[in-house]
Amino acid sequence: MWRDRLTAVNSGLLVALFFLIPMQIAPVYILTGLMLVFWLIEGRWLEKWHALRSNPVFWVYQAFFWWVLVSLLWTADVAAGWDMVSRYLFFLLSALYLTVARREHTGRYLVAFAFGVALCELLATYNWLHLNHYPDWPNGLRAQKDAMETAPFVDRILFGPAVAFAAYVGAWKALTTSGWQRIAWSLSVLSAFAVLSFSGSRVGIISFSLMMALLAFQRLAGRKMVALSSAAAVMAGCALGLYAFSDTITKQRLGLLLSESYQLDNAVNASLPLRYTMAVNTMHIIAEHPWLGVGAGDFVAEYKAVNDQRSPAWMPTRNPHNQLLFNLATTGVLGGVLLLAVWVVPPWLTRHWPDDGLGPLRVGLPLFYFFICLSESYIWRSNTGLMFMLFSALLYGPRPTPLPGEAAYPPVAPHQDSDPASG
């Protein structure tokens, strides 16, 4: 049936999106637009509506998006506000991704993500060799963050977390598969370890260590003390191992975390002190606008005013490098609560789902994002925002695998409401 073919095509496009997570975001928008066209042609509105209506995760994501949009009502800079709203567009598109993802294609999505990251790791390795050992080699694909950046498409800020989460997925698969698949997934973890050692991504290194510790805890959860001690040992081992194998630049960046922690108030515009200053200034904005925030478009202006008053020697910013503070400052208490709901509610609501083998990922995804969002607004950033939504679609969207001859969506009972789109 032609509708089933469109369903299969869209799932194939979703595979492509997983592959593109660590790359340029423009092709993602093009493929998503094509997916939306096929989704609209496919029809089945009533079936899709009932699939979404019965999925509480969909409502959490929509509430998060629409509250950002509502905040335009009290923002002064509406143009900047629309730019802010557009950065959360993936949450609006959750209706599309949640209904396109298919449980029987889980393996394809994960393999595509692994291959996309592996390709970028290969290009990053080439860049590192070119910069450090073989200057006569042709220039490779390289993000233009600084002269020593090795990531190929996006800089270390976005590349490091993608590599770290890919390592967690790879380690989880290595522990749950066998034979050549276990070998392949294990190699993906070793590859991530190697690339993080010269990536310069402190968030990538720390989150890699944290996620490996989480996986150890998840595997031994039945014995709490053993699980806790094993997780601590794994985290320490990963962190020390990555530091030991790191190149000079990455070691220097890691060492700055310690030295700068003693100079939070006086090391002007150094990385960690600057983040500390941004957090303090943002909390002053929150204190002045606690209930509704300053609106989606006014953070830059409000931050500049506070920064000029409290810390004029420090650089201004367009985001405070902390997702929770960012949402509290722009959309108030409700915005902060909705952000926490985005992380906490989905795994809580699905904790009693039948075991499909994805339970560890449903815990790992929000914990990973909660941690990395302490150092950057990673839901707000393009590639990491995409990664969060695609994995959410995989973990919370698919319906049960249909039997041969069944529709891709569950049938609608005769007494249910008419198609809401028909009006």
Image: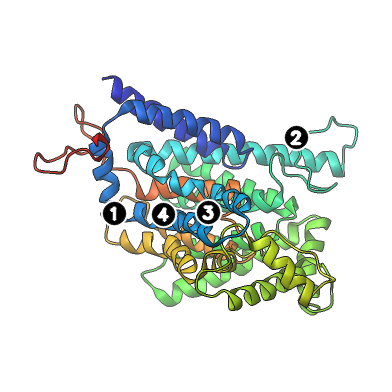
> Does the residue at mark 3 contact the one at mark 2 (Cβ under 8 Å)?
no
- In this figure, which residue is indicated by the disc labeled 1? 355
User: Could you tell which of marks 3 and 1 lies nearer the N-terminus?
Assistant: 3
How far apart in space, not on screen, are marks 3 and 2 (Cα)?
26 Å
Please state the horizontal and vertical placement of residue 341, each as a whole percent of the image: 42, 64
Say which residue appears at 60% left-offset and 67% top-offset.
374
Q: Amino acid at mark 2?
A: Leu
Q: Amino acid at mark 3?
A: Tyr
User: Could you tell which of marks 3 and 4 lies nearer the N-terminus?
Assistant: 4
> Which element is circle 1 on?
loop
- In this figure, which residue is indicated by the disc labeled 3? 168
- Would you place residue 94 above or below residue 218 in this image? above
- In this figure, which residue is indicated by the disc labeled 2? 141
How far apart in space, not on screen, are marks 4 and 2 (Cα)?
35 Å
How far apart in space, not on screen, are marks 3 and 4 (Cα)?
24 Å
Is residue 345 visible in this depiction of the protein? yes
> Which element is circle 3 on?
helix
Q: Choose top left, top right, bottom left or bottom right for residue 117.
A: top right
